[in-house]
Image (tube, rainbow, N blue to C red):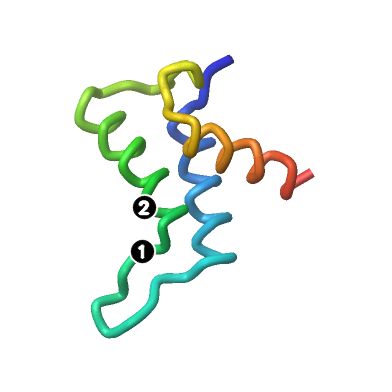
Amino acid sequence: MDITLPELEQAINYWRSLRPSSGEERALSPEVNALATVYALMIFNKARSLPLSDLDQNARQLLEQWRTGTK
């Protein structure tokens, strides 16, 4: 199974709504930061999708929680 760039954007926005940035520096939450790293690498590599198996355990869990939370 793959994650597409638009799906990843939706997951990031989901986590941003649950865990907004904080502090004067507007730091990203750990959840958003983990998915934003994947997003940045996909953009850099011009990838439109990525196999979930290529992601670390944390990112996979965050995506699963997003999918469960949006049903």
Query: Considering the image in quadrants, where does the C terminus appear?
Result: top right
- Between 32 and 4, the residue placed more toward the observer is 32
Q: Which amino acid does label 1 sit on?
A: Leu
Label 1 neighbour load within 10 Å: few <14, some 14-19, many 20+: some
Q: Residue furthest front?
A: 57
Q: Which residue lies furthest to the left in this view?
A: 44
Mark 1 element type: loop
Label 2 neighbour load within 10 Å: few <14, some 14-19, many 20+: some
Horizontal side, residue 29 vs residue 60: left or right: left
**Residue 48 placement (x, y as % from top left):** 38, 23
Quadrant for residue 46, please give it. Answer: top left
Residue holding disc 1: 28
**Residue 66 placement (x, y as % from top left):** 64, 45
Horizontal side, residue 44 vs residue 54: left or right: left
Residue holding disc 2: 33
**First of labels 2, 1 by sequence position:** 1
Marks 2,1: beta carbons within 8 A: yes
Q: What residue type is labelled 2?
A: Asn
Horizontal side, residue 47 vs residue 52: left or right: left
